[in-house]
Amino acid sequence: MEKFLWVCVFALFSINAYSIGEVSNAQVTKVRVDLDGRAMVFFDRPMGGTPPGCVNPAYVDALAFDASTSGGKAILGMVLTAKSTGSPISAFGMGFCSIYGGSTIETWNNGFLK
């Protein structure tokens, strides 16, 4: 079981090494949630790494997620905690834009509070 967990950890790190946006030790500046459950979080700086070409220039400092799913609810809880406490957050995109029509904002992959 321990070997399996290590394989999963290394797989997650290798995924983040490719064409994706990332932000480290950033402050959450805004959180937007729409009626249909789509949501986005804005950071105090643009996404680094290699964000995908589908990102609209107005959203270079944001990631999108679906807050109507269980994973999206967890993300929403984490970013609201970061916003309310001022805790820094690190997050990675998925390398594509799927939440807001496929041509606006990179989709959230994973992240963590510090």
Image (spheres, rainbow, N blue to C red):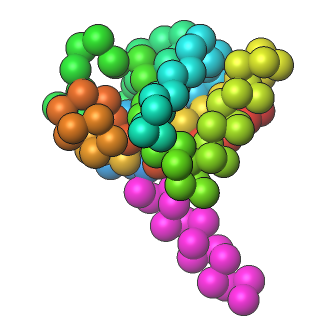
Expressed as whole percent of the image width and height from the top left, the position of residue 7 reads: 57, 76
- Image quadrant in which you'd find residue 70: bottom right
68 or 24, which lies in front?
A: 68
In the image, farthest residue toward the right: 85
Q: In the figure, is residue 95 to the left or right of 92?
A: left
Is 79 placed left or right of 103 in the picture?
right
At which x and y percent is residue 93?
Answer: 41, 41
Task: Between residue 7 and residue 38, name the one nearer to us.
Answer: 38
Q: Can I make out residue 12 in this image?
A: yes
In x, y percent, where is residue 64? 42, 35
In this rendering, the count of numbered labels is 0
Magenta-colored stretch includes residue 5: yes
Q: Is residue 32 above or below residue 39?
A: above
Residue segment shown in magenta: 1-15
Q: Residue at x 63, y 37 (%)?
A: 76
Viewer-side residue, 76 vs 20: 76
Could you tell me residue 47's position as x and y percent? 41, 23
Which of the image's four quarters has the C terminus? Answer: top right
At x 72% / y 89%, what residue is drawn? 1
Residue at the outermost bottom position: 1
Horizontal side of 68 relative to 27 (left or right) equals left
- From what the image shows, is residue 40 above or below residue 26? below
Residue 16 counted in the magenta span: no
Whether 1 is drawn above or below 61: the answer is below
In the displayed structure, would residue 41 be above or below residue 68? above
Majority SS type along the magenta span: helix
Residue 22 shows in the view: no
| Residue at image point 67% right, 85% down | 3
